[in-house]
Amino acid sequence: MQVISQIIERNLHQREHCGAALWMNPDKNDSWRKAQANCDTLKLFCQDYGTYDFLLQSGAEVEFAAFPAIPQQKYQWIILHLPRQKALLGMLLDCAASLLADDGVLWLAGENQAGIKSADKLLKKHFGRVRKLDNARHCTLYEASGKLSEAPFDALAYREQWLLDFNTHELKVVSYPGVFAHGRLDAGSALLLEALAIIQPEGDVLDFACGAGIIGACVALSQADTRVTLLDTDAIALKACEQTLAANQLEGTLLASDGLSEVTDSYDLIVSNPPIHTGVKTDNRLSMRLLDSVHEHIRPGGMLLMVANVHLPYENWLSKKFKRSIEFLKTDHYKVILAKK
């Protein structure tokens, strides 16, 4: 069991006979069952599709969305897992406080190495009483109560919009805290866009791990004869992506998926800048899952175009399932790999 779930479980006795409760972004396990025994009702909320699907299959009442739905009656207890980004924590605390009853209690749990020990400063912006409830297994659990504001949560206050020049076109990008490379163009995506300007793709294109939708939107903006699908596991990213398309009057299909789990179609091009971090840890499992089965979703003669750190030998793995796999572009830190089926 994940350590954050463990520290929450060992303190459940402090919240017995609770009314309505909400657990935001829980771990992918069955800890919710023990918490449910302490509540009249427990609703789970996930911004990650893989966790949402697991919890749904486990029988939990769970919602997948960028932000929780507004309940008929506010919650007496909210549990929130510490996100990796400080800006995302600020947004989620604002959201959670708006959903909490006046006499409600919020728990915030996270690993020490992820920055939980400094989270009390953000908690005190929203709550009058903040205390450290527990510290164990390299995790800390805070309890906050006495919320300081009754203002409703306004997601638009956290939305950021900026302009990107691509191949003689101007793209309006919409993003939120928590979305990869929030408010900027990262170096890997910039190199990928350079490659796309050379290739000029046609047909059906899948933007895997789309983030705010920059790659897929640039394809749709510059290539009128393409049909773009934008895939991500993160609900906030998909919301940003939807608004990026709308801001540029572009069409595209949004797909929530844990890796390629929900992909049933095949494409002429799959393009990706896959993330290499989970929380604070380096993790290339999503990239490896893509490489393991991506050839099944590419049409004969189609291509995979992906960006990676220069030290990762993805070409070696791709050469086992593709006719050709080459280093298409390269900088000191990143490379674009092109694999043709």
Image (cartoon, grey):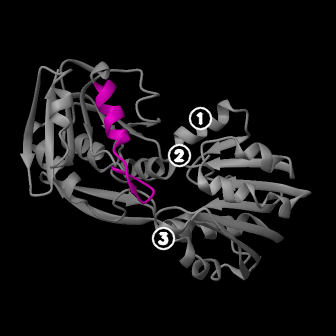
Residue indicated by mark 3 = 86
| Mark 1 nearby-residue class (10 Å; few <14, some 14–19, many ≥20) | some
Residue type at the position of mark 3: Lys
Who comes first in sequence, dot 1 or dot 3?
1
Question: Which residues lie in the magenta part?
Answer: 276-294
Residue plotted at (12% across, 53% down)? 168
Between 81 and 96, the one nearer to me in the picture:
81
Which residue carries the number 2 mark?
A: 48
Dot 3 or dot 2: first in sequence order is 2
Q: Residue at x 63, y 64 (%)?
A: 109
Residue 111: % across, % down: 55, 64
Instruction: Give the mark, 2 or 1, whose residue is nearer the N terminus.
Output: 2
Is 292 inside the magenta-drawn segment?
A: yes
Residue for point 69% across, 32% down = 58
**Residue 214 percent coordinates (x, y):** 29, 50
Q: Amino acid at mark 1?
A: Asp
Q: Is residue 179 left or right of residue 155?
A: left
Residue 25 percent coordinates (x, y): 61, 52
SS at mark 3 in the image: helix
Question: Would residue 112 be found to the left or right of residue 123 on screen?
Answer: left
Three-letter code, disc 2? Asp
Question: Can the viewer see residue 138 in this picture?
Answer: yes
- The verdict on residue 50 being magenta is no
Image quadrant in which you'd find residue 294? top left
- Is 327 on the left-hand or right-hand side of 317? left
Q: Secondary structure at mark 2?
A: loop
- Per the rendering, the mark at residue 270 is none
- Check disc 1 and report the residue beneath it: 53
Q: Is residue 152 left or right of 258 when viewed as pictured?
A: right
